[in-house]
Image (cartoon, coloured by chain):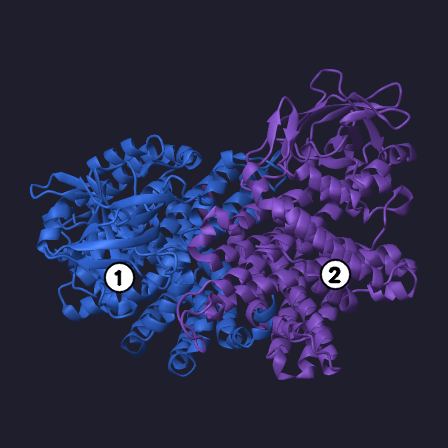
Chain colours: A purple, B blue
Amino acid sequence: MSYRAPVEEVSFFLKTCTALPRLMELGLVDLSFDVVDPVLDEAGKFAASVIAPLDRGADKQGCTLNDGAVTTPEGWRGAYEAWAAAGWNSVAAEEEFGGQHLPTCVTSALTEFWNSASPAFGIGGVLTMGAIEALTAHGSAAVQNTYLPKMVAGTWTGTMNLTEPQAGSDLSALRAKAVKQADGTYRVFGTKIFISYGEHDLAENIVHLVLARLPDAPAGTRGISLFVVPKFLVNADGSLGARNDVVCAGIEHKLGLNGSPTCTMAFGAAGEGAVGYLVGEENRGLACMFTMMNNARLAVGIQGVAVAERATQRAFAYARERRQGRAPGVDGAAPIIAHPDVKRMLLTMRAETDAARAICLKTADALDRAHRLADPLARSSALAEASLLTPVAKAFSTDIGTEVASLGIQVHGGMGYVEETGAAQHLRDARIFAIYEGTNGIQAIDLVTRKLPQEDGDVVEALIADYRDIADEVAALNVPDFGHAGTRLGEAVDALGRTTRKMLDWLPEEPAKALAGATPYLRLFARAAGGAYLAKVALAAYAERSAGGTDPRLSARIALARFFAENLATEAKGLEETVIGGAGGVLEAEAVLAIA
Amino acid sequence: MSYRAPVEEVSFFLKTCTALPRLMELGLVDLSFDVVDPVLDEAGKFAASVIAPLDRGADKQGCTLNDGAVTTPEGWRGAYEAWAAAGWNSVAAEEEFGGQHLPTCVTSALTEFWNSASPAFGIGGVLTMGAIEALTAHGSAAVQNTYLPKMVAGTWTGTMNLTEPQAGSDLSALRAKAVKQADGTYRVFGTKIFISYGEHDLAENIVHLVLARLPDAPAGTRGISLFVVPKFLVNADGSLGARNDVVCAGIEHKLGLNGSPTCTMAFGAAGEGAVGYLVGEENRGLACMFTMMNNARLAVGIQGVAVAERATQRAFAYARERRQGRAPGVDGAAPIIAHPDVKRMLLTMRAETDAARAICLKTADALDRAHRLADPLARSSALAEASLLTPVAKAFSTDIGTEVASLGIQVHGGMGYVEETGAAQHLRDARIFAIYEGTNGIQAIDLVTRKLPQEDGDVVEALIADYRDIADEVAALNVPDFGHAGTRLGEAVDALGRTTRKMLDWLPEEPAKALAGATPYLRLFARAAGGAYLAKVALAAYAERSAGGTDPRLSARIALARFFAENLATEAKGLEETVIGGAGGVLEAEAVLAIA
C-alpha cells in the first residue's frame, strides 16, 4: 500500500489552530504559507517515494553486526544520503550552523512524514536533531564549530547514550565514568545499552552524546556530566582522525524497528578510554541532556502519530477493497467499510490519530511561541505550556500508536496476522514508542508531579479554560453536524478540571495517590485536549464551509470531532472515577502483589 | 521464567462459583474434588515441565514446509506424544469413545494450562477436541467408530476447514465443492486457508472437517455441507490406507504462534478429488460446524486468558527482581513493584486475567449445567446462558489477552522489546485470538443481534439480575476491604441494564445503531460480568476468612475484586454513553470514511 502524507490536514491545522500565521504576520517567522505548503508537499513526496518503499524489506532484512561494524538494510544508505542531500536533516537547526530554522510545528510535521514512511529510518534523524539541539544550547564554541555544521548537513549523525543495564529509567544510578586529562579533554569508560543507531554505515562519523560521572562527582543526578564522544576523532582542520575507543559490542533482536540498529556501546574497552569533550558544566549534564530529551519526547510522540497514520491509511485501503458479507444499500458482497462495526474501528483509528497529531502540533506550537515571541512573559508562559503538553504528547500519542496499529490488524482479519500484509509490522514497530525516551508511566508521573504544579496550577488551569471555551463554542453553535459534541466535550473538560484539582491537593499531602492515578489522569487529559483540539479544527472547518467552502474535507473534520466527542471523550468520567476513587484500591492491594 | 499453573485459583473458583459441587452432590458428575484437584495439579505440572520449556525455542524455530510435509519445532512431537499418552487429549470426550467426559469447567482449566505453557502447542488440542465434539454430535455411527477412538486417543488429530480466500468471516460465500459418488462417499475440491495444524508431523493421520457445497446446493449458508476428509484413507480394519488427495500448499509467515503451522490446504488438486464422508445431513453443514465453533470460541477465549496469565506471571517476576529508583519504605534501589504506577499495571494485568478466566469458567459452568442437569427446562435455560456468555468469553478474553500482554512488555521497559526476554512473544502470540474463530467484531454482533433477543431478553435480564444481587451483597457487607466496590459495581450493572434495554429496542427498529454499538456494548457487558464474578469469588473468600481461614489468597481475592470495581468497572458509564449516544456519530460519518 502506498503512503500519502497528510499534507492538507497539517496545513489546515497550522493555518487555523496554531500561532504560526500570527508569527508570520509579526515577522517573527520569516516565511509564508507559500513556502510552507510546498515544503510539506515535497517532504510528503520524498517520504512516500524514497523512504516508504524500503520499509518492509528493511524490517525483514534487519541489521547485522560483524566485528564492530553494523550493516543497515539494503537501500538505507542511499535513501539517507538523498534525504540529507535534499536538506531534510537541517530543517530545525540554527542558520549559523547551516540549518533552516523552520518553526517546530513545521518540522514536527516533517518528522511525522519520515516516520510514517519508515519509523526505523526516521528514528535516526530524530536522534541527530536532538543532539544538534543539545549542542546548540550547551556546547562550547569549539565543540559547536567542530561538530554542528557536519551534523546539520547530515554528514555525521548523533546519538544519545543514557541507559546502562542497571540504570534504565533511573539515571541517578548510572556508572559510566569520565576522567579529566591534562589537556582539558576527558576519557570516558562504561557500557551503554539500547543506543539507536549507535553504530551504522550511513555516515562518515557518529557523534555520541554520553552521560558519565567524574571520579569525585556527587552521587545521584547531580553528579552526571555530558560529553561529546565522536566515533572518529576530528583533526584541527575538520578532517577525520583516529578511531576513538568506542565500539558497538552487540545489537538487539527486537520485536520491531528492525531496520534501526539498537546497539550496546562499549566506551574505553580498549583500555585508555574514549576521548570525550565536556558539554556544558561538570555535573550539570542532566540539565543539558534534558534539552535533547524534551525534543526527543515530542518527536517520539510524533512517531506514535506517524505509525498510527500509516496503519490507518492501510486499514482504510483494505476496508474499501475487501468485500465480505452484506450491507444495507450495497448489491452483492459489500466492502467491509460499509459494516457499522468496521466503520467504528476505522473512525476510531482516524480520530485517535488526528487527536494525537493535534496534541503534538499544539506542543510544537507552544515551543514556537516560547522561542519566537518578543514578550518575555509570553515566552515563558508558552514554555510552561509546552512543558505541560510534552508528556501528554509523548505518552498519549505512543499509546494510541500501539492501539491504532492493533486495530489496523483487526480490520484486516486473518490477513492482518500474516506478515506480508504489513499491518502487523506497524504494531511491532510502534510498541517501543511507549517505552523509549522515558516510559509512558514516567511521562504520566512527570505530568502530575512536575508539570501540574507549575505556577501553582495556573498553567494547567489556563489550558483547561481554553478547552472549556472550545466546548462552549461548539455547544453554542448548536448545529446538527456536531451532534452532542459540545455537551460531551464539556463533560470531559469538567472531569479534567475536577481531577486536576484533586491531583494538586494530593501532591503535598498524599503523593502516592497522585502517583497511583498518574496514568489514567494523563489519559483523561488527552481525552479532553484531543477532543478540544479536534473541535477547534472542526469549528474552523465549519466557518470555512459556512463561508462557501466546498472541500469535502471540511465536513469530514466536523464529523470526526463529533465522533471523538461522542465515542471516545466519553471515557473521561470513568477515568475521573478511577483516578479519584481508585487510588486506595491500588495502594491497599499488597495482598495481591505478594502472591500473583 | 518458569510457569506455575493457577491450580488454587481455579479450584477455589470451581468450588465456590460454579454448579460443580452441586452436580457432584446430585451424582450428575461422578467425581469429587479429591479427584479434580489432583487432575488440575498434574496437568499444571505437565504443562510447566514438559510444554512450557519448548515454547521460546518453537517460536524462534517455527515450522517448515517441504514437498507438502510440515516439520514442527524440535521437541514438539515428543511433547505431543507424551501429552496424548498421559490422556490429556481425551479429558472432554465421551466415555464410549475412550474419553473421560470430565466437566467442561474442568477441561477448560486444563485448556488454559496447555495454552499458558505454549499457545502454539495448545491450539492443536483445541481443534482436535472441537472436531471430536462435532463428530460426536453429528457423525454417523460408521464415521464415529472409524475416527473417534483414534482422535480421542490423540493418535490422529483434527482440523477445521472453513475459511477460503474470498470467504473469511462470511461463510455464505464459500465455494469449495463436493460431488456425491455412487458409493455414497463424496469427492471434495477447493482451497482452504488459515488451517491450523492442517499438516504436521505429530500424529499418524489428520482428520479434516471441511465445509463444501454440493453442485445443486442452494446459495448462501443453507447450501453448505460438512465432510470428514482424512489425510490417509482408513481401511475397513482401521489401518491406514492410501494418501487422500489433500495437500498442504503453503504455510503462513505470521506475527506469532510460530510453533503452530498455519496451512493452505488444497483439496482435490491432483484431479479426482479428496474422498470425503458426509457429517450430518446435506446442506446442514453449518449447523454441525457450529457445534465445533462454539466449543472452539470458548477455547479461544481461554487461550486469551492463558497468554494473559503467562504474561502476568512474567511481569510480576520481573517487577519483583528489577530494581530501579526509590520508593517509600525501601532502602536503596527499590524493586519496581514498589512503584504505584507499576503496581497499577500489575494489578490491571491480574484483574483483567482473573475476570476473563471467571467469565470463561462461568460459560463452561453453564455448558455443564446444560448437559448434565436432569430438568429439561433448567438445561435449556443453562444452554441459553452459555450461548449468551460465549461471545463475551471469546471477545473479552482475547481483547484483554492482547492488552495484558502489551502491559507485560511495558512493565519490562526496554527489555520487554527485546525478544530474548519472552514478553514480546506473548503479544505476538495473543494477537490472533481476537481474529480467529470469528473476529471479536463478529462476536459482538452475535451477542447483540442473536443472543440478547433470546427469550425476549429474559436470558440477559436474568444474568443482569444475578450481577445486581452480587453488587448488592458487596454493598450490604459494608466492610472496608471492599472499598467502594459495591457502589461501583452496582453502577456498572445499572449501566449494562439500561444499555441492554436500549439495544433490544433498537434491534427491530434501528438495527444499524445496535450494530454500531456492538463492540463497546460487549466491553460494557464484560465490565459488569467480570466485576460481578470477581466479587462473587471475593465474597466466598470473605466468608472463608471470617470463618477463620488464614490463606493469604483470601485477602488477595477481596483486594482484586475491589481493584477491578474501582479502577476498571468505572469504564461502564462511559461505554453506556458511547453505545447510546455515539451511534449517530458512527453512522453519519460518511464524510470521514470517504476521505481518510
| Residue most extreme to the front | B271
Q: Quarter of the image for the C terminus of chain B: give it.
A: bottom right
Residue A109 lies, in percent from the top left, at 73, 56
Under circle 2, the secondary element is helix
Please give the name of the residue rendered at 21% of the width and 65% of the height, measured from the top-left corner: B284
Tags 2 and 1 both on a single chain: no
Residue B290 disc label? 1
Residue B262 disc label? none
Q: Amino acid at mark 2?
A: Lys
Tell me which corner region of the image, top left, top right, bottom left or bottom right, holds residue A216.
top right
Q: Mark 2, chain letter? A: A
Residue A68 falls left or right of residue B526: right
Residue B460 falls left or right of residue B564: left
Q: Residues within 10 Å of mark 2 (few under 14, many from 20)?
A: many
Q: Mark 1, chain letter? A: B
Please give the name of the residue rendered at 71% of the width and 71% of the height, measured from the top-left corner: A536
Tell me which corner region of the image, top left, top right, bottom left or bottom right, holds residue B470.
bottom left
Under circle 1, the secondary element is helix
Give the camera-side residue of A329 and B303.
A329
Q: Residues within 10 Å of mark 1 (few under 14, many from 20)?
A: some
Tell me how far mark 2 sits from mark 1, CA to CA. 52 Å
Residue A72 lies, in percent from the top left, at 64, 34
Residue A406 lies, in percent from the top left, at 51, 54
Give the camera-side residue of B322 and B509.
B509
Residue designated by label 2: A362
| Relative to A470, residue A419 above or below | above
Tell me which corner region of the image, top left, top right, bottom left or bottom right, holds residue A519.
bottom right
Q: Amino acid at mark 1?
A: Phe
Please give the name of the residue rendered at 42% of the width and 49% of the height, measured from the top-left corner: B556
Q: Does residue B565 appear in the picture of this structure?
A: yes
| Relative to A503, residue B426 above or below | above
Foreground label between 2 and 1: 1
